[in-house]
Image: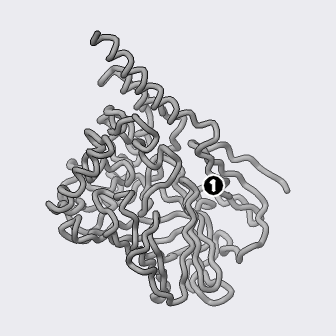
Amino acid sequence: MRHLSFGSLPAGSLLTIVGMVGLVAPSPAMGQPSSTATFQTPWGEPDLQGIWANDVSTPLERPDRFEGKVELNQEELASYTVEQQASRENRDLRDSDPGAVTDVGRAYNALWFPVPGNPIERTSLIVDPPNGKMPALTSQARERYAPWAEARGLFNSGADPRGNLWNGGWDPDMVALDGTEGGVDGRGSRADNPEDRRFGERCIMNYLPRLPGGYNNHFQIVQSPGYVVIEHEMQHHVRVIPVDGSSHLPQHVHQWMGDSRARWEGDVLVVDTKNFTDKAPFKGSFDGLHLIERFRRVDANTIDYEVTLSDPTTWESPWTVAYPLRALQSLMNGIDGMHIPQMFEYACHEGNYGLLGQLSGSRAVEQAENTSSR
């Protein structure tokens, strides 16, 4: 098989152009008509298959600078695109808060981050509420999160149930704060034991919904009669979703990525996910999280994606995020009809000394503190 290297991508992932063995029906070739009727599987369902970039750089919440402004005009969008694409630069500068924690927090420079995908016209990924902001947390959510965070040694940004919004758009306000997703507080968690560190750092999982983030922002969708499979590039999670009218698992059965069941509403795939675990809260929501995702292919290169999040114990109202997924092949200028980009395995543990360094560093700090106190 002939391999044409496309170059490496950060944090354990590699995209390369390879010959495709026909295990599933291929998506229509580039340049075909944009009618959604064109994109059908051999068994007559809408065809969502392919590798899709989940990397728009519009922030999850509307930045304060755009308060009251829902969409950018073309001139504003062009300027904002340049700004967002440059947001990965100078991520390793330490002058704002020099010290060991900042050195660690800013260790990921531009080398490790791809250029962010272009923003969309809207000023936030959140479309509801209309102000582009997450709904307020309930008092119950804050009371529930505080002891959970304290038990795990979370502090600063880690102790905020909303977390920071880096895993949901390239927010320049957050980048300007410290240049990393975790903050100069060392990602806001202690390092007494491996269990103190976040699941992503331990190569266990990332959260649903998987919103645009720093890197590894791709989905691969494969379909067969009765199932849709969505593989996340980050942490190589695979969601095997029945589309057969079957019921959810019993309420007492909880899973890391929840229990998903799907149905077709016309040309829209609707994925209903509940039964989340209480071990991995998403912005304050534990096992009460309920997601309704909608996937609709609008042309050869685009899927309109929408997700509504609800949990009455966490947020005062449901909220909805929407943005396009773009065909990775189209972003690589099409290649040719015989080769398509392919996701390789996400390798998180191999050569990863981060956790060892974090634990060793904490022991060194403790030793230094004990020595100075004598």
Residue drawn at (59%, 72%) of the image: 229
> Which quarter of the figure is the C terminus placed in?
top left
Q: Secondary structure at mark 1?
A: loop
In terms of depth relative to the viewer, which is nearer, 104 or 204?
204
Q: Residue at x 30, y 42 (%)?
A: 154
Pick out the residue farthest to the left.
Answer: 139
On screen, residue 176 versus residue 293, left or right, reads left
Reply above or below: 175 against 36: above
Q: How far from the left and from the top, in percent, is residue 363?
A: 42, 24
Residue type at tag 1: Met
- Along the horizontal axis of the image, is 109 left or right of 3? left
Give the labeled residue for mark 1. Answer: 332
Q: Quadrant of residue 284?
A: bottom left
- Residue occupying image coordinates x 18% and y 56%: 143
Up the image or down, 288 lies above or below 91; here it is: below
Q: In this rendered view, identify the residue nearer to me: 347 or 91.
A: 347
Question: Mark 1, residues whose alpha carbon is within 10 Å: few (<14), some, or many (≥20)?
Answer: few
Q: Residue furthest right?
A: 1
Q: In the rendered image of this protein, does residue 337 appear above or below residue 368? A: below
Instruction: Give percent across and percent down for residue 6.
Output: 69, 47
Residue at the spot x=43%, y=76% of the render? 294
Q: Is residue 173 visible to the viewer in this orientation of the structure?
A: no
Tally of numbered tags: 1
Rendering colour mode: one colour
- Percent coordinates x, y for residue 142 in the rendering: 19, 56
Instruction: Decide which of 327, 161 is in the foreground and name it.
Output: 161
Residue 213 placement, left or right of 68: right
Residue 251 shows up from this direction: yes
| Furthest-front residue in this view | 374
Q: Which quarter of the rendered picture does the N terminus lie within?
A: bottom right
Q: Quadrant of residue 184?
A: top left
261 left or right of 146 in image: right
